[in-house]
Amino acid sequence: MRAALQRGRAWLRFGASVVATVTLCAATNAGAQTTALVGGSVYPVSGPPIENGTVLIAGDTILAVGRDLEVPEGAFVLDVSGKVVTPGFIHANAQVGLIEIGSSTIESRVNDNHVAAGLSLVDAVNPASQLIPVTRAGGVTTVISVPTGGLISGQAIALSLSGESVDDMLVLAPAAIVGRANRSARSYAGGSLAGVFSRLRTLFRDAQQYRDNESEYDANRLRELSASKADLEALLPLFDGELPLLLTANRRSDIEAALRLSEEFEFRLLLRGGKEAWTVAPKLAQAGVAVILDPLENIPTYDGLQTRLDNAAILSSAGVSVSFTVSEEYNPRLLKQQAGNAVAYGMSWDDALRAVTINPAEAFSLDSILGSIEQGKKADLVVWSGEPFELSSYPEMVMIAGQEASIRSRQTLLMERYRDMLSVGGNQ
């Protein structure tokens, strides 16, 4: 199973590179159909903004970006003058595809297993979810959908918000192992957060013992371990550096304990929540730990008394890679609004744009194909009516893998229906 996982992840990264190369060669050498977005203000993220810029797209891949580019003869040209072009946004901690209406449609957890590292969400994704078009209409083209509950919740997956099937949507699975070290996790470890880290240490040591003594385990000559074979096996990519641990922790003491845990077991740590992360910003920067947070969380709780609205700004200024999430699982469409509020509370505009594009791409090892407008990357783009973080701006076009994606949803259909009814009634 481990070998298959390694091969699968290696194929995914290698395959993305090969597809990009083949597509570019086909476009260049065989005259494949090219699309050109011309005249807009292009924010590539990988470099400075390009006024009156051009983005050339061949198939599902970005062919070139720059100013005064020659548009190939026969290209389909879209004039986006006066508009802003950005990479598609990436929501770094979502429930899209897994949740619809309250507790009746939550597919992201297993209630009877507190250690569910082997839980894959792939079979739980609903491609017909009504949250998908709503989220896409907010300029989000990729989400990291995560499991919930327990001590080790399961495996996060990366989904593209376009496609008729899960196979069409799947970008990377698994993308991370997801765990919790916040107050909600105490009930799985004797009611103490010290117990949470003690149990995590035991679990990780058992996973390493299983790795080193697999034949003994299979022959039933090893002591009983603290998780099932499937869950222990699913944890092994952490120690091989293939997957990060996405761990929820909010208090300073818990964040520092998480740092010690990652140093002890030598895995890559991603922190989510991070209400008091600003208090240890230099430590997080030095350790290279990325933080995924809701920039509007500022209400003190016992799981974060020192939370503040400039958390993202302080972290970013200290050199920490920050990505944004929306705590309300029904409103991932508000990601741009979160970024705008982070700017209002001191974060630079450029850092806020990185927080919804390249930073989450790097955190989940997707930056070779997503997160910026660069040659060879997937053509996930958004054409905005104006500055993306302004409340009045909106996506006029969302492009995923080089194809225009619908930004109509149940919400827009309802709005149009009742608007038209009022219009008819007013004429009578």
Image (cartoon, grey):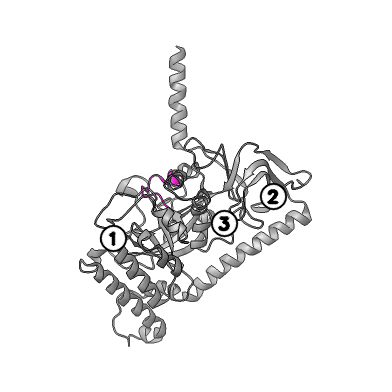
User: How many other residues sit within 10 Å of disc 2, few (<14), some (14-19) or many (≥20)?
Assistant: some
| Callout 2 secondary element | strand
Q: CA distance from mark 3 to mark 1?
A: 34 Å
Mark number for residue 66? 2
Q: Amino acid at mark 1?
A: Asn
| Residue 310 located within the stretch drawn in magenta | no
To which quarter of the image does residue 366 belong?
Answer: bottom right
Looking at the rendering, the stretch of residues picked out in magenta corresponds to: 325-335
To which quarter of the image does residue 229 belong?
Answer: bottom left
Relative side of 401 to 317, left or right: right
Task: Please say if 238 is above or below 88.
Answer: below
Magenta span: helix, strand or loop, mainly?
loop
Q: Position of residue 80 (x, y in %)?
A: 64, 38
Screen quadrant of the C terminus = top left
| Residue 327 located within the stretch drawn in magenta | yes
User: How many other residues sit within 10 Å of disc 1, few (<14), some (14-19) or many (≥20)?
Assistant: few
Instruction: Look at discs 3 and 1 and give the one toward the viewer.
Output: 3
User: How many other residues sit within 10 Å of disc 3, few (<14), some (14-19) or many (≥20)?
Assistant: many
Please report whichever mark, 2 or 1, sits nearer to the chain's N-terminal start.
Answer: 2
Q: CA distance from mark 2 to mark 3?
A: 18 Å
Q: Is residue 236 visible?
A: yes
Instruction: Look at discs 2 and 1 and give the one toward the viewer.
Output: 2
**Residue drawn where x is 52% and y is 61% of the image:** 362
Instruction: Look at discs 2 and 3 and give the one toward the viewer.
Output: 2
In the picture of the structure, the residue carrying the numbered disc 3 is 370
Q: Position of residue 287 (x, y in %)?
A: 44, 69
Please report whichever mark, 3 or 1, sits nearer to the chain's N-terminal start.
Answer: 1
In the picture of the structure, the residue carrying the numbered disc 1 is 111
Q: Amino acid at mark 3?
A: Leu
Q: Nearer the viewer, residue 8 or 93?
A: 93
